[in-house]
Amino acid sequence: MIACIEQGYLQKEIADASFRYQQELEQGQRVMVGVNRFVTAQEDDLQILRISPKLEQEQVSRVGEVRRKRDQARCSKSVEQLRKAASAPKENLMPYILDAVRAYATEGEIMGAMVDVFGLYTEQAII
């Protein structure tokens, strides 16, 4: 299994299956209600969620307020403990993530600690 993963076999199989599935949809061999059968003629009915700049700014302000009111030392300590735990082999990170959340660390701060240790995964294209 490890050799399959390293050689990209599983990723290629998933990509091939996705391609076949899409071809079947487009050719009508596979039915998907609302996509290739029983499709409404009016696309005007489609409601797209648009966040107003005012609402976006309100949320930014709320996050800023949380950051101002939280115990910064506790938050920094919990994020640093998460970073250290992530560096340890086979450590369960969930308790550390929960401690960081309870200390009002943001999602970005929590993810940043893990990215520092694990890096960002970028899937390689299979040809």
Image: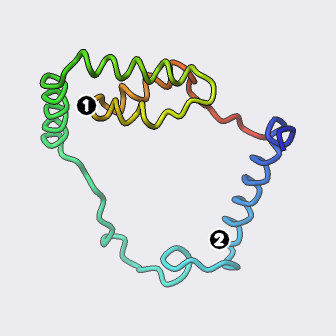
Q: Are discs 1 and 2 less than 8 Å apart at CB?
A: no
**Residue located at (42% from left, 20% from top):** 81
Question: What residue did someone put label 1 on?
Answer: 104
The residue drawn where x is 72% and y is 59% is 19
> Looking at the rendered structure, which numbered label has been put on residue 26?
2
**Of 114 and 86, which appears nearest the observer?**
86
Q: Quadrant of residue 28?
A: bottom right
* Residue furthest to the right: 3
Which image quadrant: the N terminus? Answer: top right
Identity of the residue furthest to the bottom in this view: 38
Amino acid marked by disc 1: Tyr
For residue 95, above or below residue 32: above
Q: CA distance from mark 1 to mark 2?
A: 47 Å
Image vertical order of residue 83 relative to residue 111, above or below? above
| Colour mode of the rendering | rainbow
Q: Earlier in the sequence, mark 1 or mark 2?
A: 2
| Circle nearer the viewer, 1 or 2 | 1
Question: Relative to 26, is 46 on the left or the right?
Answer: left
* Residue 60 rendering spot, x and y as whole percentages: 19, 32
Secondary element type, mark 1: loop
Depth order, front residue of 18/28: 18
Residue 34 drawn at (x, y percent):
48, 77
Q: Where in the figure is residue 33, as x and y percent of width and height?
A: 52, 80
Quarter-of-image position of residue 71:
top left
Question: Dot 2 surroundings within 10 Å: few (below 14), some, or many (20 or more)?
Answer: few
Q: Quadrant of the C terminus?
A: top right
Secondary structure under the numbered disc 2 in the rendered image:
helix
Which residue shows up at 74% across the image and 64% down it? 20
Residue at the (66%, 65%) spot, across then down = 22
